[in-house]
Every structure is written in C-alpha cells, then in structure tokens.
Image: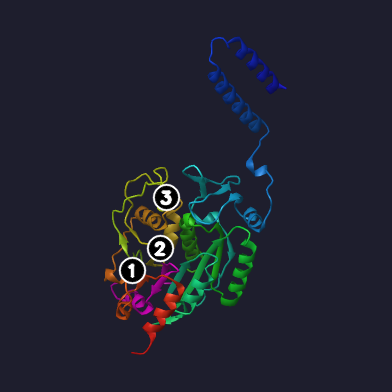
Amino acid sequence: MAIKNIWHSFLQETRSYTHQIKKPFILLLLALTLLFLLFSIAYTTEFSLDTVMYPQNWLTKVMNQTHNKVIDSIWANHNQKHILVPLPNQQIQRRGTTVYYHVAHPSNYQYILDEPDKCKQIPFLVLMVPVAPNQVEARNAIRSTWGNESTVQGKAVITLFLVGLTGGSESEKTQQQLEEESRQHRDLLQSNFVDTYFNLTIKTMVIMDWLATRCPQANFSMKVDSDMYLNMDNLMTLLLAPNTPRQNYITGMVMWNRPVIRDKNSKWYVSEELYPEPNYPTYLLGMGYVFSNDLPEKIVEASKVIKPFNIEDAYVGACLKHLDIAPSSPPDPSQFRAYLGQYIREDFFRVITTILGSPQQLIDIWKDVKRPT
C-alpha cells in the first residue's frame, strides 16, 4: 500500500510539470523510478536469485550440494558464459560483463573422486595432469606411455589426472564413465568446479591443494598438461642432481616480463580489474613445470591473499612473488621446449617436455623412442 501511494504521488507531481519538461525526459524519469521501485520491492521482500526455482539436472544437484548454483550455461569454450550464483558468505569475481567465477582458493571446492591413500608408499615424484573430463583418449595415451613408469632410476613415481565437472545433456553419462574409469585405474581426481578453459586457475589451485593435503611427503611434483611428451629419465636426472634444491624450487620454461593481454578478443585477455599491472611477474609456462613438494602448501596459503585471474601459470607466478620465491631456470633450458617441429628421434632423447599434436602422436613417438637401437 505504501508503494502504491508513493507511485500515485509521483504521477501527480509529474503531471504538474509536464508543460515544463520534454516528453523523453519524462519517460526516462519514469523508467528510473520504476527501476527504483522494483529494487525496493526486492529489498523489502528479501528477494534473492537463490529463491528462484530452476530445473534440477544432475550437474545442478551436485553443485547445490556443495558450493555453487548453476543457473545458465553454455559450456563449449571459455568465451561462452557460465554464471554462478553465490551462496551466503561466498565471493564471486567478475570478468567483463558476462563471465563470473569463484575465487581460486581451493577451500571453495570439494572432491567428488579422490585417491586419498595414493601416497601411502611415499612417492619421490607426483605427476599431476589437468585434463578435460571427456578426454579419455589423452588419459589412456599417457597411461600407456610416460604415465606407466612407476619407477624411474630407482625412484617411485605416481601419475594422477584432475578433472572438473562437465555440463550439458551428456553430463550424467560423462560422470558415469568417469566413475567407471576411476574404479578401473584408480588415478582420477575430480573436484566440483566447472571444467572450462577460463577456470584453469581453479584447476591448478585444486592440484596444489591435493598435493598439500594428500601427498605432502613426496619430494617433488610436476604439473604437466595432457598433450605433452615427457622424458622421465631426463626429468629424474634433473631432480636427482646434487645441485637441485629440495625446497622452494620450481623450474620449467621461464617467462620473464610478459605483458598482460588487454585485447578483449584474445584467448588470454585479463582485465585491469583482475590484474592491474602491465606485466606479469616471472612465471613458468603452464605446459609443464616441476617443483619441490614444499611449495604446494605455500602457494595455497598465498592464494588466500592474491586476487585470482584466469591465466593459471601467471597466477602461480604471482603467488610465488608474494612468497618471495623466484622461479629457477633449468640447467639446460632447451630441455623444456614448446615445440620441436619436424620429428627427429634424437631430439626426444634430449628434452624433458614438449607439446605434441594428439594422443596418437604421443603413442607413436613413445614407441619409436623406446625401440631398441
């Protein structure tokens, strides 16, 4: 009734000034007032988006049980939107005008698939592979190549894959397949973040959390992408070298003074709101970097105060800068290669990591490199 009276009074006032004010201005004023009244109604009735009812598919149910409510989603790539509604006492970061995501700190997320006892036998090295839920072929290629090497130069190695949640009509089927794959191989970790390119920072921080909470006793860990060739012998030689530090050590392909991309059409766009500096701190290219296993806990702690942004490897660099830990150049920088170009067998004897084009290419090259000479 009070709102109705306010509206009636406003109309009376408006009519009295009609001869002085132009019609477009009156319409604008009416629209603004109506908007104000709608917000007033929302406030007085304690209306929130959380009270709106949405169809409860499998993904929404899982997210509701943990941290997020997914309202509207198009999942194909990071340029398309996914909107997360905050539950009480949660923070949402905003990117541009359409994309929202939770802060990267891993305490915002929980594990759906886990292997909490995987490190009971205390591995020397843990390989953590972020991979999309539907990339079964990539996981199987790794399982049959470098991920199958459980002992290298007498040191125990384990390989684990981390996935998030997928969406769309195939989400429930994909989840069932992941659970079956997990039962078969016991090497899958899954957390309840939405698995998109834009959320790679979250994915990396969940990796760090798993290492800090489930496997702190390992000596070294490596975050390595699923499209990589990894020479395990060369990696182990690097880690066993007497001058390789066992604490505060991280190495790979070092990036110095890399400018922040401000082009909104770029895959690597970061707004000034998320990261105001013109250049990133020194960081390791995300394709594959290895680190002493005291660092995950420290990086997770740093992430509590370092504002997240969507370039995952640069974000780890920002956490390291906060910790006053400088990334190290490898003894032979040419061992961490982006691309080798035309296949030459001898090149793969020398590298530690390089990017490949497909899971089948990994299998073919691995077979050729391992064949007797």
Q: Quadrant of the C terminus?
A: bottom left
- Amino acid type at circle 3 is Ile
- Rounded to the nearest whole Å, what is the CA distance between mark 3 and mark 1? 32 Å
Magenta segment: does it hold 322? no
Disc 1: which residue: 339
Asked if 243 appears above or below 372 in the picture, the reply is above
Q: Quadrant of residue 288?
A: bottom left
Q: Nearer the viewer, residue 316 or 78?
A: 78
Disc 3: which residue: 306
Q: Position of residue 343 (x, y in %)?
A: 33, 76
Disc 2: which residue: 295
The magenta region covers 217-244
Q: Position of residue 165 (x, y in %)?
A: 57, 60
- Please identify the residue farthest to the right as the structure is shown: 1
The reply to whether dot 3 and dot 1 touch (C-beta < 8 Å) is no
> Marks 1 and 2: which is nearer the front?
1
> Marks 3 and 2: which is nearer the front?
3
Q: Secondary structure at mark 1?
A: loop
